[in-house]
Image (cartoon, rainbow, N blue to C red):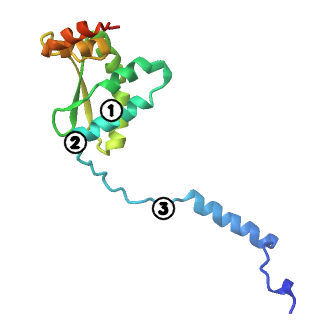
């Protein structure tokens, strides 16, 4: 027995190839509609929001590096099942974050799989404790709690910069 007789031909006859492309065209133009099932909104917690908040901050472009760094130091707080709040220091920062609200909400809605996620921006009150961002600010806040740190700094001859 010869090997050539056992194979399958990939050539199509001219008559059958025209009809097969016609069938493909007909099936391609009439897609079968899939039944629409309502999307379920998943429950999330503050830890989930914080995780995806940090993830969003990490994917911001280089032009928004200042906002990205600020976002990395922030921790959104959950107000209710679907709303979280971000506290900022002043009006300028609030303006920047309010411009990003739609983008952040859309990102978190897709990542948390919940279409009702909403974000609010609040300016901190003057009597509210500020968040220390730099080394000097952190040291000053610790020194307010424990004055022995100032004495230790002086004894060791350390400088803050």
Query: Which image quadrant is residue 34 in?
Result: bottom left
Callout 3 secondary element: loop
For discs 3 and 2, the disc positioned in front in the rendered view: 2
Q: Mark 2 points at which residue?
A: 45
Q: Mark 1 points at which residue?
A: 105
139 sits to left or right of 103: left
Q: Which residue sits at x=29%, y=35%?
A: 50
* Contact between labelled residues 2 and 3, with CB atoms less than 8 Å apart: no
Picture layout, residue 33 above or below residue 118: below
Q: How far apart are marks 3 and 2 (CA)?
A: 38 Å
For discs 3 and 1, the disc positioned in front in the rendered view: 1
Picture layout, residue 101 above or below residue 80: above
At which x and y percent is residue 102? 35, 28
Reading the chain from its start, which is encountered first: label 3 or label 2? 3
Reading the chain from its start, which is encountered first: label 1 or label 2? 2
At which x and y percent is residue 42? 26, 48
Callout 1 secondary element: helix
Extreme-front residue of the structure: 155
Q: In which quarter of the image is the C terminus?
A: top left
Q: Distance between the residues labelled 1 and 2?
A: 15 Å
* The label number, if any, that marks residue 32 in the structure image: 3
At which x and y percent is residue 4? 86, 83
Query: Which image quadrant is residue 53 in?
Result: top left
Q: How crowded is mark 1: few (under 14 residues within 10 Å), some or many (20 or more)?
A: some
Q: How far apart are marks 3 and 1 (CA)?
A: 33 Å
Q: In this view of the protein, can residue 116 be seen by the observer? A: no
């Amino acid at each position: 027995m010869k090997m050539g007789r056992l194979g399958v031909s990939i050539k199509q006859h001219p008559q059958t190839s025209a009809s097969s492309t016609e069938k493909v065209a007909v099936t391609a133009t009439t897609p079968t509609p899939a039944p629409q099932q309502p999307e379920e909104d998943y429950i999330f917690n503050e830890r989930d929001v914080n995780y995806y908040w940090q993830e969003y901050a990490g994917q911001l472009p280089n032009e928004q590096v200042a906002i990205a760094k600020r976002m990395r130091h922030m921790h959104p707080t959950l107000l209710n099942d679907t709303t979280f709040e971000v506290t900022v220091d002043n009006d300028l920062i609030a303006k920047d974050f309010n411009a990003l609200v739609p983008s952040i909400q859309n990102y978190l809605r897709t990542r948390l799989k919940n279409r009702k996620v909403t974000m609010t921006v609040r300016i901190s009150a003057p009597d509210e404790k500020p968040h220390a961002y730099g080394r000097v600010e952190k040291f000053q806040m610790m020194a307010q709690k424990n004055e022995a740190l100032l004495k230790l700094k002086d004894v060791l001859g350390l400088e803050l910069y």
